[in-house]
Amino acid sequence: MNVWGAVFLGGGIGSLMRYGITRLLLALDLRGAFPWATLLANVISVIILSWMILRMSGHFQQRPVLSAFITVGICGGFSTFSTFSYENFLLFREGMPGMAIANILVNVVACLAIFVLIARHT
């Protein structure tokens, strides 16, 4: 398989994982105003991506297809900036600017903190 095919396949798997997280949280009745599914998908994706980039880069330098499958494909399909942006737009539109700002801060700070924590342990 070439890199393009690996990204395509990984993106599909990541998108299915993202959909699965949403369905799982809906089944658990976590439907409050805060977009938990997007936060969870973004955090898990950053954990995978930062681990791959910071801890496993030497192992995957000779395996560009596998690296692209996981980092670009799975992580790209699993994390979701477009949904994150849309959910914040809805929170602002629904008169919940505090919730929108909290969502923005929690997503950005948590995801950056994950990279920092994993980088410090490399």
Image: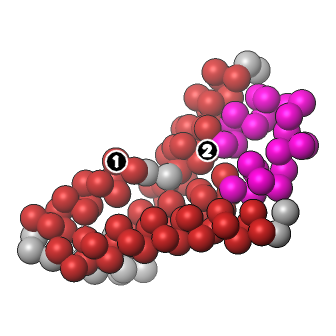
- Residue at 82% from the left image edge and 69% from the top image edge: 121
| Any part of residue 43 in sight | no
Mark 2 nearby-residue class (10 Å; few <14, some 14–19, many ≥20): many
- Residue at 59% from the left image edge and 57% from the top image edge: 45
Whole-angstrom CA distance, mark 1 to mark 2, is 16 Å
Q: Which residue is mark 2?
A: 74
Give residue 61's position: percent from left, percent from top.
86, 34
Q: Which residue is mark 1?
A: 82
Report the mark closest to the observer, 1 or 2. Answer: 1
Amino acid of disc 1: Ser
Give residue 90's position: percent from left, percent from top.
17, 62
Quadrant in which the N terminus appears? top right
Q: Nearer the viewer, residue 77 or 50?
A: 50
- Residue at 75% from the left image edge and 57% from the top image edge: 51
- Look at the image and give the residue range highlighted in magenta: 50-71
Quadrant in which the C terminus appears? bottom right
Q: Is residue 119 left or right of residue 13?
A: right
